[in-house]
Amino acid sequence: MKTLKIEDLSKNFGSTEVLRKINLEIDEGNFLVLLGPSGCGKSTLLNIIAGLETINEGNVFIDDYNVSKVEPKDRNIAMVFQSYALYPSMNVRENMIFGLKQAKTSKEKIEQQLEKVSKFLQVDQLLERKPSQLSGGQRQRVAIGRALVREPRIFLFDEPLSNLDAKLRVEMRREIKKLHQQLKTTVVYVTHDQTEAMSLGTRIAIMNHGVIQQNDTPENIYNKPSNTFVADFIGSPSMNLIKGSLKESSGEISFTASGSNFEIPVKGYEFKDKSNLNNKEVFFGIRPEHIYFKKSNETDFEVTLRADLSEYIGHEQIMTFDYANQEILAKFPSTIKIELTKETKLYFDLTQTSLFDSQTEERI
Amino acid sequence: MQDNLKSSSYQQLEQKSKYTNMFLRWFLYFVLILFASYFIFPLYVMVVTSLKTMEEIRQGTLLSWPSGLNFDSWAVAWGGRGYGAGDTFLKPYFWNSIKMVVPAVFFSTLIGAMTGYVLTKWRFKGDSWVFLFLLFGCFIPFQAILLPMARTLGALGISNSIVGLVLVHTVYGIPFTTLFFRNYYVSVPTELVKAARIDGAGFFKIFFKILLPISAPIIVVTVIWQFTQIWNDFLFGSTFSFGEAAPIQVALNNMVLSSTSVKEYNVDMASAIIAGVPTLIVYVLAGKYFIRGLTSGAVKG
């Protein structure tokens, strides 16, 4: 049984296609993050799961039951919003029990739930306050509490941290993580922040233009991006994509950047399809953090590059190098001194590379 | 030497700027007092004239102080002289106006709030057209609808009645009240409505439990606006009612125009003040909310 299943879902607003053939499944207890740039359709997808938006095509199942035409309140879900959406005229207690009262829950049960949740979230001292008298973090907690008291099957979070300042955001992120660890509930979480996505999700679905680009574990999203969009979107700075072609001779495959004849061996790379690799136009992908200043593994491959630009950001520095007239970024600890405009020896970690077809932009 | 020179020239400049500032300040006060007296002047004349006897009015000047607090003309304006035919006084018409203005303000405000709520939180296809046509209602000259409205009231059997006037004022208030509430609710986050829907609240529950309780500032604005419009209306009142069903503004007009022999300025002035006082009271009671409601829109919290 899948806690949530989305089947061939499409949605358009007038002539604008917002979601295209979305297929998605979540098992009980998973934390799914919908990640993508603004306008990719992730919030619309969340609203559809909640039942706040209608569907043009496809179905939504919760616990194998088709809820596509079921009212939001009957879907056994709860949602936390970006603006918290606490009812301004009600105090914290009334805010938290509003849903239970609508559902005609018994008084004892309501009191019991309220006490349990407010203690758990440490808002039991704030019950008589109005939302306007709360700090950002407290509002956030109350909003989560309002979702918790209903004991839903699925929690929906719509960018719940983006209204908080940087410090509080990191704090609340940890709290949400703890919450999920303790309660082991199923969560769908929308964000455009990749750090949030990586640290919270047990699975991440990356979306662009209404299509899911990759739905995978955070590790696979980072290490094995399924196309150039994902490779470019995840990581800061994003993955270097060097344009060039593959060469196959006597079973050994190597990569040559366009405009150079320097060969990088492609050893131990797991190709999806090993045929027709010779002369294939590809992007060679390597993350800035996988370019080393000192050789650290046997498999590291030595290259000599000219440093063009240095960006100091405190704990580390981002250097820009020239590789056959293509820019390559690398990230080093700021203790390392690299002279600009000079050739420097660097090491590519060949276990951490990705290859993409330059036509389809898909991983090969 | 150099330093001394410098400091003395700075002193001069300081002195100069002090005089300039003082002059500007006094000039400002002068202008403000001038304008204030310009606005207070008519009210002053009305009040002092209403407290004078006819004798004093004939002898004194417009601005002269009354000899004493003489409320006789106020009593005549409110309750009449006590003899039968031709004695027009304001009391019954004042209550007519109250009976007209209270339900008309209530219904137009409530309906405007609901329309504003639907137009912002339950968007539907073509809703912006509906809003546009409602806005036209704000700009239609009321003279243009007198005839069709008279026919309508006749067909409904409520011409020349308070109920008819309540209907007219409610209908012609809705464009304005809708505009006010729509612009207010636009700034209320729609996520509130979404959250309430997930919590299981329906259309009316969301309106009455969540949106209406945070609408106090705009309700005050709307009530003041509608009260003033309806209370001060003369056109609809004089067209759709006469005799006993007339509102106070019509009665005031009849009273002032139909005095038989001598113009009783003191009674006229007292009547005019009585007819204008309710709107003043509403402003004084709710004025600070009026300003707040007009300037603020966003609901934070």
Image (tube, rainbow, N blue to C red):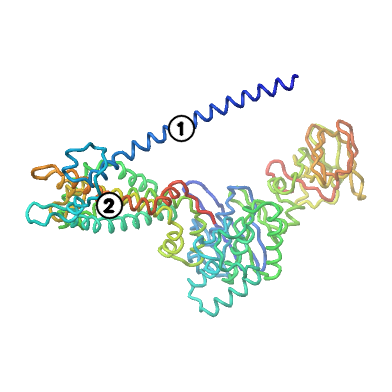
Crowding at dot 2, Cα within 10 Å, few <14 / some 14-19 / many 20+, comes out as some
Query: In the picture shown, does residue A226 fall above or below B144?
Result: below
Q: Is residue A161 left or right of residue B191?
A: right
Residue A52 in picture, x, y percent from top left: 50, 59
Which is more toward the observer, A19 or B261?
Answer: B261
The front one of A87 and B126 is A87
Q: Which mark is residue B171?
A: 2
Cα gap from disc 2 to disc 1, whole angstroms: 45 Å
Q: Tell which circle, 2 or 1, labels the residue nearer the N-terminal end.
A: 1
State left or right for residue B170 relative to residue A279. Answer: left
Coordinates of residue A325 in the picture (x, y in percent):
79, 31
Decide which of A186, A302 is in the foreground and name it: A186
**In the picture provided, is A181 more to the left or to the right than A103?**
right
Task: Identify the residue shown where x is 64% and y is 72%.
Answer: A119
Residue with the mark numbered 1: B28
Quadrant, the N terminus of chain A: bottom right
Q: Is residue B279 above or below residue A89?
A: above
Amino acid carrying label 2: it is Val
Image location (x, y in percent) of residue B241: 16, 52
Question: Under tag 1, what secondary structure?
Answer: helix
> Mark 2–mark 1 contact, CB under 8 Å?
no
Depth check: give the residue in front, A188 or B9.
B9
Q: Are marks 2 and 1 on the same chain?
A: yes
Eye-nearest disc, 2 or 1: 1
How many discs mark residues in the rendered view? 2
Q: Give the letter of the chain under mark 1.
A: B
